[in-house]
Image: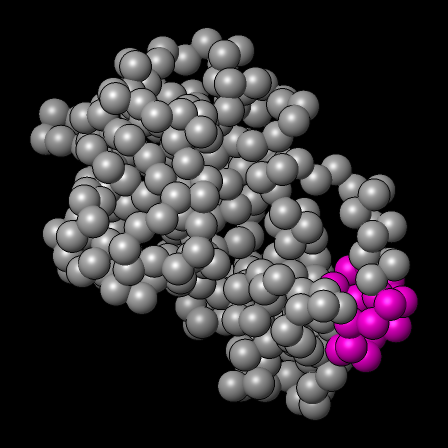
Amino acid sequence: MKGIDIYSGTIITDWNAVKTDGVEAVYVKATEGINYINPLMDSQYREAKGRGLKVGFYHFAGRNIPAQEYQHFINTISKYQQDLKPVLGYEVANPDMSFVTVFMALNPGLLSYAAHNVADQSGLPKNKIWIAEPGATPADTKGYAGIQHSWTGRVAGMQGDVDVDLFSNDVLIDSNNVVLTASSAPQQPVQQGDPAVRIIQQQLNYLIKVNLTIDSIRGELTNNAIKAFQGIMGLVQDAIWGPKTIAAVTEIYSKPLDGVQYQHYEYATRFIQWIVGVTIDGVFGNETKIKVQNWQASTWINSRRSSWDSNMG
């Protein structure tokens, strides 16, 4: 079963062409860490489901308490009808295997996505592993739930490099294998306040690490955090979550290729400058370039975890 896995930076121009190219299964990035939610998750899910494709979600692991990350993931995806088992994606050079063990133990229906440095010491059976083997040309999945065999694939209806996968039926949820039910996760209290404020609070925590309580209530601390973000973006600090503030968040989430020689993205540049500690002027000049290079040299970034992911993880 041919599949793809996608995230907020994936550009899909024609979902019908994706299906015609033989794609049957789509894994959508839902969450990362304990705050991030893919802003395109809902639309990506609905577009894929609308074409009759099988859809599931994956969580990109951060460096937090496993139960907290799991709860964030399940809370986010449980409202969707899913065809594919939920996945923990764990991509690190020096893995903390206790994180994987604890996270996977929270739900027997989970699958694990990883490279061999993690998968081979996880103790999981092959049919619970979606293995990363870029460059492989598999005729079958070799007993794995799936094989991600390309990071630079080409699929009709999609722009740029695509993660292309081959899946077995072990990724499927069927009537005898209900992975997500109302009782899959501990009961949560009914959320009070405005759900839109909850999303704003999550985004602010993720982007500028303000550690707001996620209570869906628009209080002074939330307003101050909005103003702080607006200040970094060079916007009027009025605490109004309006079109310009949303545009800034959206541009940062798109993780554009930003630098001296690339197309200019003012909001993304301002965010980068804030991260690396250089004067925030929205211009990616040589001073910013040097600061970014020094930051990259001092920060662990592997071949699959970009500077953007490390900034925002």
In-image side of 141 versus 289 (left or right): left
- Closer to the camera in the image, 101 or 289: 289
Residue 287 drawn in magenta: yes
Taking the spot 13% from the left edge, 31% from the top edge, the residue there is 174
Q: Position of residue 202 (x, y in %)?
A: 55, 60
Extent of the magenta region? 271-288
- With 13 as the anchor, is 232 left or right in this view? right
Q: Residue 264, relative to residue 60: is it above or below?
A: below
Q: Residue at x 32, y 43 (%)?
A: 4
Up/down of 136 relative to 235, above or below: above
Query: Where in the figure is residue 266, as x and y percent of width and height?
Result: 68, 78
Observer-nearest of 48 and 38: 48
Q: Position of residue 31 (x, y in %)?
A: 47, 48
Q: Which corner quadrant holds the N terminus?
A: top left
Task: Using the rendered image of the protein, determine whether residue 73 is visible from the camera's viewpoint.
Answer: no
Q: Which colour style is shown?
A: one colour
Classify residue 39 as left or right of residue 155.
right
Please identify the quarter of the rendering in which residue 211 is found: bottom right
Q: How many marks?
A: 0
Q: Residue at x 27, y 55 (%)?
A: 156
